Image: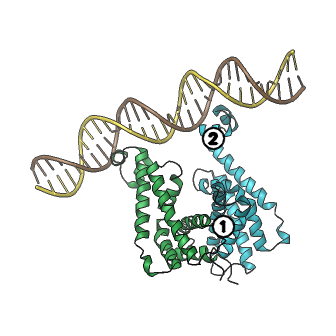
Chain colours: A green, B cyan, C brown, D yellow
Amino acid sequence: MSTVADAAGVSRATLHRHFPGRQRLIDAIGLEAIRETDAAVSAIDYAKMSSTDYLLAVFEAVVPLGDRYHFLAVTASGAASEEVRTAYARQIRGVEEMVRWMARDGVLAPSAPVDWAVLVIDSLIYTAWTAVREGSVAPRHAAALACRTFLSGLSKGE
Amino acid sequence: MSTVADAAGVSRATLHRHFPGRQRLIDAIGLEAIRETDAAVSAIDYAKMSSTDYLLAVFEAVVPLGDRYHFLAVTASGAASEEVRTAYARQIRGVEEMVRWMARDGVLAPSAPVDWAVLVIDSLIYTAWTAVREGSVAPRHAAALACRTFLSGLSKGE
DNA sequence: GCTCGATGAAACAATTTTGTCTCAAATTAA
DNA sequence: TTAATTTGAGACAAAATTGTTTCATCGAGC
């Protein structure tokens, strides 16, 4: 709590005034993370684009929020309350829908399990965010790189 | 500490006898994780195989140790001592060498940054382990799936 | 200037976690 | 069997973390 208070630039007392208790703080962060990613993704107008363009747009929108996404993935299977867990599960189902859309479009290989694709997308989001943070990849290339990695991998085309 | 003791099936007192202090325990787990993965990887005789076969062999060897690998990645940038951090850095350099080997063999696309490839391999190891743990993927398919995802992605070949 | 609400600092209590010690019981080795 | 070693249980102290309260202070708005 004191670390969080310092990072936020407020006193420990003020932190407790806004979030009465450690659990409430964790839940509030979780819900905020969900709200932010939800807002970023639902701002995409998927009516006009192909499923792969949509995937790229999602990566573009969510990779900068990779820390939020990761916080969710970690705490939703641990310290978070039931409310956050169910909200996170709904978010995952959103990714699943996207994967099914790509599968219907014939983009995904039939041998690729949906659950696996969902997990890979999740981990690529965080990996791309990490790569940007540690300076391995330029911010504006990260999403495209993750998207291409998901679709085509890193081997030479031929 | 008490959670670890319970999980290990020993008393808290015994845990303290073997690892005098929290820090020593964390470091011991970290070093053990490195030792195990090192042993698994160095058992592969890479002289007789192509770089992609080697990649698959590494996945086969390390995916079952995904929790060890992940523990390292998390603690090496936090609670671990300098010794563990440097040992982990050496391990990462091992992955980097493998990537460079693939690049020399012309397997990897020239546009794929080495650092990115290393991060993706790391995350795919843990993702594959997670997929097995949650039952999404059969244990004997996980490594091949991760390997194929890394090389070719999940899109339909053509 | 004045009031009101929010903040920071500090003291304080309560709880949790960590670390230590002792002793009886169990296990092992001789 | 006997001796040595290891363990578990529990009491205990020490430290860290969390939660609460008070009070002076700051700043915005009137």
Q: Position of residue A2 (x, y in %)?
A: 43, 47
Q: Secondary structure at mark 2?
A: helix
Q: Position of residue C13 (x, y in %)?
A: 38, 29
* Res A152 → quadrant: bottom right
Q: Secondary structure at mark 1?
A: helix
Q: Nearer the viewer, residue B39 or B93?
A: B39
Residue A46 visible within the image: yes
Q: Position of residue B17 (x, y in %)?
A: 69, 34
Which residue is denoted by mark 1 in the rendering? B121
Q: Which residue corresponds to the image point at 68% horizontal and 74% vertical from the top-left? A: B151
Residue A1 visible within the image: no
Which residue is denoted by mark 2 in the rendering? B4
In the displayed structure, B15 sits above or below A99; it is above
Q: Nearer the viewer, residue A50 or B27?
A: A50
Q: Position of residue B4 (x, y in %)?
A: 63, 41
In the displayed structure, B25 sits above or below A76; it is above
Chain under callout 2: B
Q: The residue under label 1 is which amino acid type?
A: Ile
Q: Name which of mark 1 and mark 2 comes first in the sequence.
A: 2
Distance from Cα at disc 1 to Cα at disc 2: 29 Å
> Same chain for marks 1 and 2?
yes
Chain under callout 1: B
* Res B124 → quadrant: bottom right
Q: Quadrant of the C terminus of chain A?
A: bottom right
Q: Relative to residue A97, is residue B130 drawn left or right?
A: right
Q: Are the two marked residues, 1 and 2, in contact with CB atoms closer than 8 angstroms?
A: no
Q: Nearer the viewer, residue B151 or A50?
A: A50
| Residue occupying the far front of the picture | A104
Q: Which residue corresponds to the image point at 35% horizontal and 44% vertical from the top-left? A: A13
Q: The residue under label 2 is which amino acid type?
A: Val
Q: Nearer the viewer, residue A33 or C13?
A: A33
